[in-house]
Amino acid sequence: MVHGDADLVGKTLSESGLRERDITVLTLHRGTTVIPNPFGKHVLEADDRLLCFGKLEEMRSMIPTRKKRRARVKKLPKQPIQPE
């Protein structure tokens, strides 16, 4: 998925640099529209989903890193809970 703050937003497939990374876009999904074998003139928009073929390492390098969430741990009460 092309995230809203990605460098690819607003660029055409030709300008995106995907070809230079040996990544081929097979299908572009935009909302309910499916564009098979999109041409280089298609401009990428936020929330576009791309089905790609290419080197796995190259595609993984384009995925933004996620922030790790800290686990929320509840503190136990000092006194045991008595059944009613």
Image: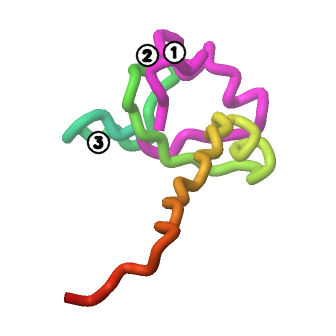
Give the amino acid at mark 3: Val
Secondary structure under the numbered disc 3 in the rendered image: strand
Give the amino acid at mark 1: Thr
Q: Position of residue 67 (x, y in %)?
A: 63, 38
Query: Residue, x 43% and y 16% (percent of image)?
Result: 43
Q: Where is residue 53 in the image (x, y as percent from the top left)?
A: 63, 50
The alpha-carbon separation of the residues under discs 3 and 1 comes to: 17 Å
**Residue at which label 1 appears:** 12
Query: Residue, x 62% and y 19% (percent of image)?
Result: 16
Which residue range is magenta in the image? Answer: 1-27
The alpha-carbon separation of the residues under discs 3 and 2 comes to: 14 Å
Secondary structure under the numbered disc 1 in the rendered image: loop
**Residue at which label 3 appears:** 34
Q: Where is residue 34 in the image (x, y as percent from the top left)?
A: 29, 42
In contact (CB < 8 Å): disc 1 and disc 2? yes
- Assess whether residue 22 is covered by the magenta stretch: yes
Q: Position of residue 77 (x, y in %)?
A: 47, 67
Mark 3 vs 2, N-terminal side = 3
